[in-house]
Image: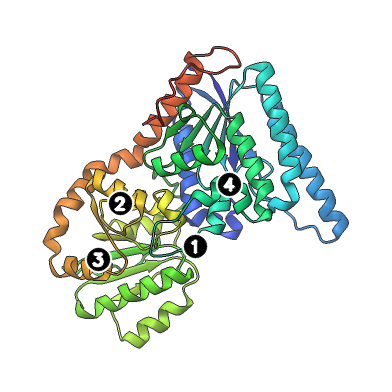
């Protein structure tokens, strides 16, 4: 075997429905991918557990916070494996708590880990899913976000300084940082003064959810008209505007059907009723099995974010759509536009033009055929985790075959790894 890895697994709170969103699908797929590597690498899963009870008094809350902080620091320092694998920001100490309350513990814990690594030669890989500060501060707009403000701490709110410092500490102590796009890789290199040789690209996400039960019976129209699918948080203001325009496009095509699932959907029923539409269906918040059973009977998957934080990466929905053989129609986000050009499974359009593009596809469904055929060709790459395997092999084999002491592997500084 290549060596031993300790993976800090963020445990989802299924009672709160955390497992049903994009983050839940992503984390479940990641865990399933890592379990499939056990014949090649010894992996120990260290759980980052949710709190099972809510402290009532201030004293109880303070005691719980202190206890959890010290327990997380212990878990950080106790692992004896050659490599530690983290998933940022769902990591010990900062993964579930209010950042302002735990950042002192985080600075202490990850500072001690950096010292331990220097002494022992232990390695660390940090896989990025999200950047919390950017996620909070970048607002949807009609233009690509200006990231330069994040490269100068003085331009950030003071409330973000401590987290930015901890984030820098984590990325600095890592031997490999795995970024979900070239845009994000360039951004974090500038933000945290990281050498490009430290950054490996994760070109696509895996889509391998766990089906805990059989899918629920949901009627999907079997008529010849195209079937369109969208899933996500339906309460986001910019998304509501975009989704309303899409809903009204179905007035012209009664044989086409639109299936929508996700949380915060209260406004949809009223919108559909006002429009008098019989071919727009809200399905609720679906479990994985039911979600995919409906998805694989559709023809088109929609991605409707405006320019925003989501320019920095593809979404879990993209992987889901391609894994199930759908043509993809997306707004022209930077990363998704690049991916669609490379994968040839669909089209990116401005948000203003997207309803017209959708109407054209509904009117001429034969144009979907080459996109759907290409998606079916790529489907197994997403389901088997081929794109995850690329960075995993590169990072893990680098660290286990080029062990040169605490200084880390000998890698050229000629740009982010592809």
Answer with mark 3 or mark 2, whichever residue precedes in sequence. 3
Q: Residues within 10 Å of mark 2 (few under 14, many from 20)?
A: some
Q: Which element carries disc 1, helix, strand or loop?
A: loop
Q: Which of marks 4 and 2 is nearer the N terminus?
A: 4
The label nearer to you, 2 versus 1, is: 1
Question: In this orientation, which residue lies closer to the viewer: 311 or 371?
Answer: 311
Q: Which residue is drawn at 36% across and 71% down?
A: 243
Q: Residue at x 56, y 42 (%)?
A: 88
Disc 1 versus disc 3: nearer the observer: 1
Contact flag, marks 2 and 1 (Cβ < 8 Å) = no
In whole angstroms, how far apart are the C-alphas of marks 4 and 2?
28 Å
Q: Are marks 4 and 3 in contact (CB under 8 Å)?
A: no
* Residue name at image x 54 percent, y 35 percent: 193
The local secondary structure at tag 2 comes to helix
Foreground: disc 4 or disc 3: 4
Query: Which element is circle 3 on?
Result: strand
Note whether residue 214 is visible: no
Q: Residue furthest right?
A: 59
Q: Report the residue at 41% width, 44% height from top.
A: 183
Q: How far apart are marks 1 and 4 (CA)?
A: 18 Å
Q: Where is residue 219 in the image (x, y as percent from the top left)?
A: 31, 69
Which residue does the numbered mark 3 point to in the structure image?
Answer: 227
User: Mark 4 or mark 3: which comes first in sequence?
Assistant: 4
- For disc 4, the marked residue is 152
- Mark 1 near mark 3, Cβ–Cβ under 8 Å? no
Q: How far apart are marks 1 and 3 (CA)?
A: 31 Å
């Amino acid at each position: 075997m290549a060596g031993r890895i300790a993976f800090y697994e963020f445990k989802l709170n299924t009672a709160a429905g955390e497992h049903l969103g994009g983050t839940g699908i992503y984390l479940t797929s990641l865990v399933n991918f890592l379990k499939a590597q056990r014949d090649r690498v010894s992996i120990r899963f260290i759980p980052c557990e949710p709190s099972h009870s809510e402290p009532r008094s201030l004293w109880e809350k303070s005691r719980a916070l202190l206890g959890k902080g010290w327990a997380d620091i212990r878990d950080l320092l106790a692992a004896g494996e050659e490599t530690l694998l983290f998933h940022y920001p769902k990591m010990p100490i900062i993964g579930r708590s209010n950042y302002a309350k735990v950042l002192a513990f985080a600075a202490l814990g990850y500072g001690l880990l950096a010292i331990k690594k220097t002494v022992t030669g232990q390695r660390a890989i940090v896989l990025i899913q999200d950047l919390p500060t950017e996620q909070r501060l970048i607002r949807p707009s009609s233009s690509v976000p200006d990231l330069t403000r994040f490269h100068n701490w003085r331009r950030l709110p003071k409330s973000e300084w401590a987290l930015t410092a901890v984030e820098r500490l984590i990325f600095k102590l890592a031997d490999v940082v795995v970024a979900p796009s070239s845009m994000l890789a360039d951004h974090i290199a500038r933000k945290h003064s990281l050498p490009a040789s430290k950054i490996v690209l994760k070109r696509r996400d895996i889509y391998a959810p766990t089906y805990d039960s059989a899918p629920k019976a949901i009627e999907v129209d079997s008529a010849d008209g195209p079937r369109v699918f969208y899933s996500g948080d339906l309460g986001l203001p910019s998304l509501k505007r975009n989704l309303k325009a899409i809903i009204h496009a179905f007035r012209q095509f009664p044989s086409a059907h639109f299936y929508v699932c996700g949380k915060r959907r209260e406004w949809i029923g009223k919108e559909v009723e006002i429009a008098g539409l019989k071919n727009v269906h809200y399905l609720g918040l679906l479990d994985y099995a039911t979600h995919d059973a409906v998805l694989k009977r559709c023809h088109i998957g929609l991605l409707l974010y405006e320019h925003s934080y989501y320019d920095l990466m593809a979404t879990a929905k993209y992987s889901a759509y391609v894994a199930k053989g759908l043509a993809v129609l997306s707004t022209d986000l930077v990363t998704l536009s690049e991916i669609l050009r490379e994968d040839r499974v669909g089209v990116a359009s401005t948000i203003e033009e997207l309803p017209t593009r959708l109407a054209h596809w509904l009117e001429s469904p034969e144009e979907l055929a080459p996109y759907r055929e290409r998606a079916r060709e790529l489907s197994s790459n997403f389901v088997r985790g081929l794109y995850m395997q690329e960075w995993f092999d590169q990072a893990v084999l680098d660290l286990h075959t080029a062990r040169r002491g605490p200084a880390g592997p000998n890698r050229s500084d000629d740009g982010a790894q592809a």
